[in-house]
Image (spheres, rainbow, N blue to C red):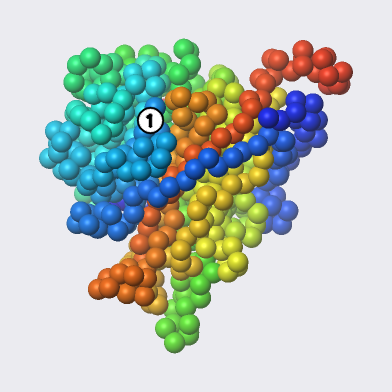
Amino acid sequence: MGSTALAQTSANVKDEYQDFEQMEHVPFAAGDAGGAAREATVFGGSTMVVKGFQGVSQYDVASYARNFIPPDTMGAVGKTQFTEFVNGGFAVFDKATGNTTKATSDLAFWAAAGQTGANGDSRVMYNKAADRWIALSFGDSVSDIQIAVSNTSDATGIWQSTKFTGFAGGTADYPTLALDNNAVYIGTNNFNAAGNFRGTTLNVIPLASLIGPAAPSVAGLQQLVAPCNPATCTDAGFAIQGVNSTGPGSTGHIVAASLLFDDVLRYDLANAGSGAATYQNAAYVGIQDYGSNNAARQPNQVPDIFTNGDFPSNDRVVDTLDQRIGSSSYEVNGRIYSVYTVTPLNGDHTYVRYDVIDAATNALLDEGAIGDGLHDYWEGSLAVNKYGQVVIGYNRSGSDPSDGNISFLAQAFSTGIGGKLAKRGDEQLLKVSLVDDYHNGSTFGKIAAGRQRWGDYSAVSLDPTNDREFWVIGEYAREYNNEASGHPGGSGGSRWSTWISELNVGTAVPEPATWTLMLAGFGLLGSALRRRRGALSV
């Protein structure tokens, strides 16, 4: 189960200002030596893990006879609840206690919402203005995308649904979800029945059609198709992400990994949500180049008795996917924030790279990476509050038995002058996998076989009741499904699970416009086609 896309293939203001004065912006290094990017200055601001609790696991979905790999980990926070979707399951948690208030299969959820089936790749968001939830998934046919909207802010209550054909006769794969004040944006990667990539579609639906007094509909749906075949390919990006925003003029913004270059593509939609949207202001951002991602390391080495010297061990099999922007992007104060996984040129460890783009000019304001050249970092996601504070969640693993098990972590940042990010406190370890050799497709002690997918994504969401509370959800590995781990009669296979954490990022950092007054008060002084980038039209 899962996507078949390219992976088929209170800080002191004076101290904070001085930190900014010392911060350098240097390019990515070649290879792992010196790290893949500048190390962002660490602010004195604190980041605190408020709580963490178990989310849905593969054991749970297997109990519904819905046993899938990978989970496609997805969740969001509302006023009183955290709602989670994975391949095969749906759950709602009391966010104050972490207690489960509802858990069922994905089929049961969609049946109650009015659909006849589901095939995963779910996404979910909470719309603060409407005080309602919105979710999507493949339909019973993977050509279709179905959308559900809750009647109230209670995710355990009634949801209503609608659907549309995303890519007739094939798969409307890896559907993304974003909302602004005008529209809902759903990007798909399109594959024909033979599994060949045939381009992308950006589906734009007026927000009022889905979240209004009436039942949700796709009235006014506009499908912007960018075809791709062996002869020609229109570059509208891959895994297209609409940019989430609540700003009055921040609508119709799109960001994606380029189809043709090692770059990020940015463009806008004029008249978004009107049924007559058109592309405009398309440009390549000009990020640092990168190499291809390899599998993530783990500590375990399979003994020679199993490998006989002829097979790879299980220490490096977990798929880190490609450079796609797999999680939500956000616009705050005229800046667009995104995150994705890359490997530096001539390097062999993956990093979670972030970038900050000027929404009006498409200028790259900042780019950096989370990584150390010793571990693999991947599957990043982020959210941004109105103060420009950012939380990025991600996985990390490595070969060292002391800290190499696949772990779920988070790092907070503050946005400073010119859109530069600086670390806010230390990296937060949220959950460590229970095994050192997670793999799929084979049993305990055996060589990994078959698809070794992870993710395909994680998620960070901003608490609608507190702008400094962020909620992150990601994947980790549970115990093996065997008798030694407390599962008599189990298959012996690896099992994924999910973890949910609440983080508080502390006092806000002033926006650049306030710096002059504050400084005066303190008496301070102030991988087919590559490398060709330029203007384009889509």
Q: Quadrant of the C terminus?
A: top left
Q: Quadrant of residue 273?
A: top left
- Residue 210 spot, x, y in % from top left: 26, 22
Q: Is residue 454 left or right of residue 285?
A: left
Q: Which residue is mark 1?
A: 80
Q: Quadrant of residue 11?
A: top right
Residue shown at 44% from the left, 40% from the top? 459
Residue at (77%, 12%) from the top-left corner?
517
- Residue drawn at (36%, 37%) of the image: 94
Q: How many marks?
A: 1
Q: Is residue 79 left or right of residue 288?
A: left
Residue 284 in view of the camera = no
Question: Which amino acid lies under the numbered mark 1 shown in the image of this protein?
Answer: Thr
Frontmost residue, 385 versus 319 = 385
Q: Residue 65 lies in what quarter of the image?
A: bottom left
Characterize the local packing of mark 1: few (<14), some (14-19) or many (20 or more) Cα atoms within 10 angstroms: some
Position of residue 183 in the picture relative to residue 311 (left or right) = left
Is residue 348 rendered to the left or right of residue 444? right
The spot of residue 253 in percent (x, y) is 45, 23
Q: Nearer the viewer, residue 406 or 131?
A: 131
Height in image: 424 above or below 537?
A: below
- Front one among 279 and 525: 525
Task: Give the percent coordinates (x, y) of residue 128.
Answer: 39, 22
